[in-house]
Amino acid sequence: VRDIRILGKDKNVLRLSLLSRNKRSLTGIYFGDSTSFLEYLSHKFGEAELSNALSGKDNNIKIDIAFIPSINEYQGKKYLQVVIQNYR
């Protein structure tokens, strides 16, 4: 995980900048329980690492995700993203 952004008027969507094992950058979006997701990261990696990820700083958060690939169209441009279904 390179970066985490909290989105939505209810702060219930997470956008993650991810780096795969083979060093490919991709964007992940998570529509699940964002509070539980962030608590999981804090518990597993520590509050300092989570704070770094939320600030876009270097961190040591590494997770496995199950996802569905999708195309996000925004302002006439199309982007590949992954919709995160589960994590560990």
Image (tube, rainbow, N blue to C red):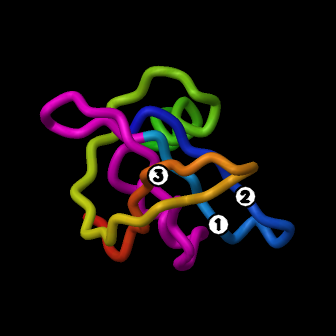
Please give the label number shown on residue 42: 3
Q: Name the residue under label 1.
A: 13
Give the percent coordinates (x, y) of residue 26: 38, 42
85 w.r.t. 83: above or below: below
Callouts 2 and 1 close, C-beta under 8 Å:
yes
User: Which quarter of the rendering shows the N terminus?
Assistant: top left
Tell me the distance, in whole angstroms, between the alpha carbons under discs 1 and 3. 17 Å
Amino acid at dot 3: Ser
Amino acid at dot 2: Leu
Q: Name the residue under label 2.
A: 7
Give the percent coordinates (x, y) of residue 37: 48, 66
> Disc 3 on helix, strand or loop?
helix
Characterize the local packing of mark 3: few (<14), some (14-19) or many (20 or more) Cα atoms within 10 angstroms: some
Give the camera-side residue of 45 and 16.
16
Characterize the local packing of mark 1: few (<14), some (14-19) or many (20 or more) Cα atoms within 10 angstroms: some
Q: Answer with mark 2 or mark 3, whichever residue precedes in sequence.
A: 2
Give the camera-side residue of 43 and 27.
27
User: Which quarter of the rendering shows the C terminus?
Assistant: bottom left
Amino acid at dot 1: Val
User: In the image, is residue 44 part of the stretch drawn in magenta?
Assistant: yes
Which residue is painted at 36% across and 44% down in the image?
Answer: 45
Give the percent coordinates (x, y) of residue 87: 30, 67
Q: Answer with mark 1 or mark 3, whichever residue precedes in sequence.
A: 1
Which stretch did the figure color magenta?
A: 18-45
User: In the image, is residue 23 part of the stretch drawn in magenta?
Assistant: yes
Which residue is painted at 27% across and 62% down in the image?
Answer: 65
58 w.r.t. 13: above or below: above
Callouts 2 and 3 close, C-beta under 8 Å:
no
Tell me the distance, in whole angstroms, between the alpha carbons under discs 2 and 3. 19 Å
